[in-house]
Each structure stands twice: as structure tokens, then as C-alpha cells.
Image (tube, grey):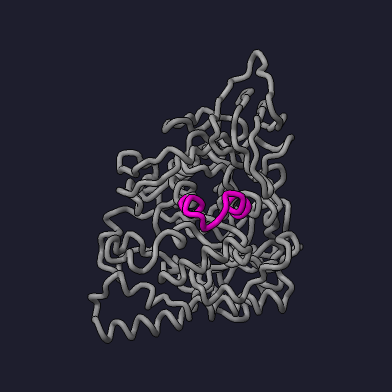
């Protein structure tokens, strides 16, 4: 931490962009203005017209600790996240053991306080037998209750209708759902096994985990939320068919039901399975060109409220297994902003919209005070992006522990030049400074 003066930047915040300067004092933004004068102890950065954005708040990552540290750790993945412009993350419960008790959530906070370069918060996972923990869990314990309404890791498939009713009735926080209908997926898989045996190609993934599986489960979650007046956030929307279910007219702060999509759904489509195979196998599946186009449009018009990653690393050996045995998920955090900015540079969404969906909206949705915006007095979570400097993604640059990326060999037209976390420049010109760690996020919104 320290005092910084960022000059000659293109600031992007709250629906507008302008040329100006920003001063950081300690952990917080002190002044936003123009022609600011350097003070004796200021470290001065000449942005030379680069874009200065609020730090990204990623509402969905899987950092694998505890129990799966051969894939990833909070330490390694938080560093990769900072390199991708993510200054805060919210981590999912499917670890080993799963995060299904208040004690397990507290353990993750203890781990992160010792190792995370980014700011952090954690979800409680719902199961068929932890309703008492769900009732005790509030926004002071973590960011929400995660419900897997479809086949998932370990004990976290909530498939008992009576328990689902209790979760939506009794949860005291935002409910976050993974929506895929297991009977539909199983029927599709049985059909493909009858045709192909066990030799199913990864290109069949969007046919097995298809749009019908998503929309059936999403409708169920929404029905439950409406019946019990719960706040619901539906994760990783992957299909055009689901978009008509969501409201794009109500302001975000008044919505009871919100939706997120992920950066890989904007970049890949089903044609990429031929090239990448299991490397882009994820749940829900990457689907078809029409879905990709309509997801981008829905992100632009506000039907989709949040853009995140669903970063979910596995080792290359695990991904090299046959399709049926290969795990679902891919590493994404290090390249979040360069990938998302391709949509901006192609003119499909504006930079102001990207900042709204990736920075402002998560702060509003979870009630995270003093983050997600460029405002005087807020924490200095900042990202300086050069939209004129391209970079090719090479294996030796990768920071995620798994050591691979689905973007290897691609060239993106922008570069994350610097990332500040609480006023500490944690990433600069391709190098990390992890001498100051991130902080626990304060979650300010519960069920209401």
C-alpha cells in the first residue's frame, strides 16, 4: 500500500468514460479529478490513455482448497485472478470436504487470510441434510447459499423436493443456483450411450447437457423463489432459451431474481469442441453459435446482470481422460479481462457495460460496500488496461496451478497492465507483488 497518482487515464465508471487522474492514499481512493499535482511521496503512473477500471468482483470461482490442492490452491488461483484484473472473488463450496457447515466456511476464511492476494468471500453449500446450517448462515458468515439443482460433486446435489422447499423458505441469504435437470441429462446420456457406447466424443457435451436440462431446472428454481419470496441468483446461463425468463427492465437493486453468465460462453461455442475437446468441457456446457450471440446481446441489454468466470481448474492428465471420465471445468481467471474486452473491441458491448456487469453489479447484488466503483473514499481496487497492446497467451506465462489454459496460442488485443488491491499494486507489467495480502469482503445484503 501507499500513495499513488495515476495520471492521464481513461476512467470508466457508472456508465461513462472520461479522461482524468486518480489519487490513492493508503488503501483508498482519495481524489478523482484532472490535472492533479503529485505530492512528495506519491508514486506517479502515467497511464497514457489506458483504461482505468474498478477491480473486477468475480462471483463464481472454484479454488479447490481444501482437499484438491493438486489442482489449485487459494494462493495460486488468487494470484492468477489478480493478473486477470480480478481484485475480489467469491469461492464455491465443492471442495473436499465440501463447505457445508459454518465451521468449514470459517476454515476457508482462515486459509484465505494467510494466502490470498485478492479479496475474498465464501459460499455455504446446500445438501439434503444440512438445513440447520443453512438456517444459521447469514451474510455475516459469507456471500450466500449455493444450491446444485443438478448432478454435482460429492454430496451437494439437492434433489429432495421437500428440502428444496425448506432451503428457499428458510435461507437467510441470497440463494445461488447451478441449474441443470439431472433426469434430462441422464436420459440424453443414455441415448448417446445406446448410439456410441462408451466412445462418446466431447462434441456431444452440449447435446447431453442441453438447453432443455438448463431451462427445466431454471424454471423450478424461479418458481421456488417466487413462492417463498427468496432472493435468487442463477449462475452461468449458457442458453438463449433461458433468456426470456429474466427481467431486463427492473433496476438491479430492486430485482429479486438475477442472472449471471460467464466469459467462456461469450468466447467459445460448439464448433470449438473439435479443436479443444475436453479442455472446454464444463457444466453447464458451452453450446451453439446462436446461444453465444444471444448471450452477448443479453449481457448488453441487461437481461443478464453479472459477468463472471466459473474458474474451475483440473490437471491436464485429468482432462486427457476419455470424455465420460474427464472432469468438467476450465481455468479462466488470469485472462478474464482480455477475453471479455474482445467483445468490447469488436463493438458487441461497450466498455461501460462491461464494467457494470463485472464490477458494479456484483457489488450491488451482494451489498459489498466501498468496492466495485471508482469513488472517492472507496477501496482502491483498480485495474489499468491497455487496449492498444496485444498479447499472445503462452504456457510459460500461466499462473494457475494446473498449468494450462484453453486460450493458449490465442492473441488478445488488450493487456492488464496493473492491478491494485486495497491500494497495493499487486500486478505490474507481468510481475506479481504479493507482499500485501487481500482482505475479507464485507457482504451487506442477506435475503432482503
| Observer-nearest of 201 and 291 | 291
Q: Residue at (52%, 66%) from the top-left corner?
A: 295
Q: Main secondary structure of the magenta part?
A: helix
Residue 415 lies, with reference to residue 201, above or below; the image says: above
Q: Magenta segment, which residues?
A: 342-357
Q: Position of residue 270 (x, y in %)?
A: 36, 69
Quadrant the C terminus occupies: bottom right
Q: Would residue 134 be found to the left or right of residue 71 on screen?
A: right
Is residue 290 rendered magenta in the image? no
Image quadrant assignment for residue 242: bottom right
Q: Residue at (34%, 44%) from the top-left corner?
A: 393
Q: Residue at (48%, 81%) from the top-left corner?
A: 212
| Observer-nearest of 229 and 53 | 53
Residue 234 lies, with reference to residue 11, above or below; the image says: below
| Observer-nearest of 310 and 148 | 310
Q: Residue at (33%, 64%) from the top-left corner?
A: 272
Is residue 350 rendered magenta in the image? yes
Q: Position of residue 2 (x, y in %)?
A: 62, 23
Q: Position of residue 369 (x, y in %)?
A: 72, 45
Q: Position of residue 185 (x, y in %)?
A: 42, 79
Picture mark count: 0
Amino acid at each position: 500500500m501507499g500513495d499513488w497518482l495515476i495520471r492521464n487515464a481513461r476512467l470508466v465508471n457508472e456508465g461513462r468514460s472520461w479522461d482524468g487522474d486518480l489519487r490513492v492514499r493508503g488503501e483508498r481512493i482519495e481524489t478523482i479529478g484532472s490535472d492533479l499535482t503529485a505530492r512528495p511521496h506519491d508514486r506517479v503512473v502515467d497511464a497514457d490513455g489506458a483504461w482505468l477500471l474498478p477491480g473486477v468482483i468475480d462471483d463464481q470461482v472454484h479454488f479447490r482448497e481444501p482437499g484438491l490442492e493438486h489442482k489449485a490452491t487459494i494462493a495460486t488461483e488468487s494470484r492468477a485472478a489478480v493478473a486477470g484484473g480480478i481484485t475480489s472473488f467469491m469461492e464455491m463450496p465443492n471442495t473436499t470436504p465440501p463447505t457445508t457447515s459454518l465451521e468449514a466456511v470459517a476454515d476457508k476464511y482462515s486459509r484465505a487470510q494467510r494466502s490470498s492476494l485478492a479479496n475474498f468471500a465464501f459460499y455455504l453449500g446446500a445438501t439434503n441434510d444440512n438445513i440447520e446450517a443453512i438456517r444459521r448462515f447469514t451474510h455475516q458468515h459469507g456471500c450466500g447459499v449455493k444450491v446444485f439443482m443438478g448432478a454435482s460433486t460429492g454430496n451437494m446435489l439437492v434433489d429432495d423436493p421437500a428440502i428444496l422447499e425448506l432451503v428457499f423458505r428458510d435461507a437467510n441469504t441470497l440463494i445461488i443456483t447451478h441449474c441443470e435437470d439431472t433426469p434430462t441429462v441422464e436420459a440424453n446420456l443414455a441415448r448417446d450411450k445406446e448410439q456410441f457406447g462408451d466412445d462418446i466424443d466431447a462434441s456431444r457435451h452440449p447435446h447431453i447437457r442441453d438447453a432443455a436440462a438448463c431451462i427445466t431446472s431454471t424454471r423450478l428454481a424461479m418458481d421456488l423463489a417466487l413462492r417463498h419470496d427468496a432472493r435468487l441468483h442463477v449462475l452461468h446461463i449458457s442458453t438463449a432459451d433461458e433468456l426470456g425468463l429474466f427481467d431486463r427492465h427492473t433496476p438491479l437493486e430492486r430485482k429479486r431474481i438475477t442472472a449471471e453468465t460467464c466469459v467462456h460462453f461469450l468466447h467459445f461455442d460448439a464448433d470449438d469442441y473439435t479443436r479443444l475437446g475436453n479442455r472446454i468441457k464444463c457444466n453447464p456446457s458451452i453450446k451453439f453459435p446462436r446461444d453465444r450471440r444471444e448471450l452477448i446481446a443479453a449481457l448488453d441489454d441487461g437481461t443478464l446482470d453479472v459477468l463472471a468466470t466459473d474458474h474451475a481448474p483440473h490437471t491436464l492428465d485429468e482432462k486427457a481422460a476419455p470424455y465420460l471420465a474427464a472432469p468438467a471445468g476450465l481455468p479462466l481467471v488470469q485472462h478474464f479481462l482480455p477475453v471479455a474486452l474482445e467483445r468490447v473491441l469488436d463493438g458487441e458491448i461497450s466498455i461501460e457495460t462491461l464494467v457494470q456487469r463485472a464490477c458494479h453489479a456484483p457489488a450491488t447484488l451482494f451489498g459489498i460496500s466501498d468496492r466495485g466503483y471508482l469513488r472517492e473514499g472507496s477501496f482502491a481496487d483498480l485495474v489499468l488496461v491497455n487496449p492498444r497492446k496485444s498479447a499472445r497467451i503462452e504456457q510459460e506465462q500461466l499462473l494457475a496451478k494446473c498449468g494450462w489454459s484453453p486460450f493458449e496460442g490465442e492473441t488478445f488485443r488488450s493487456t492488464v497492465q496493473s492491478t491494485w488491491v486495497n491500494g497495493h499494486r499487486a500486478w505490474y507489467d507481468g510481475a506479481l507483488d504479493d507482499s500485501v495480502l487481500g482482505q475479507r469482503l464485507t457482504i451487506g445484503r442477506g435475503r432482503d
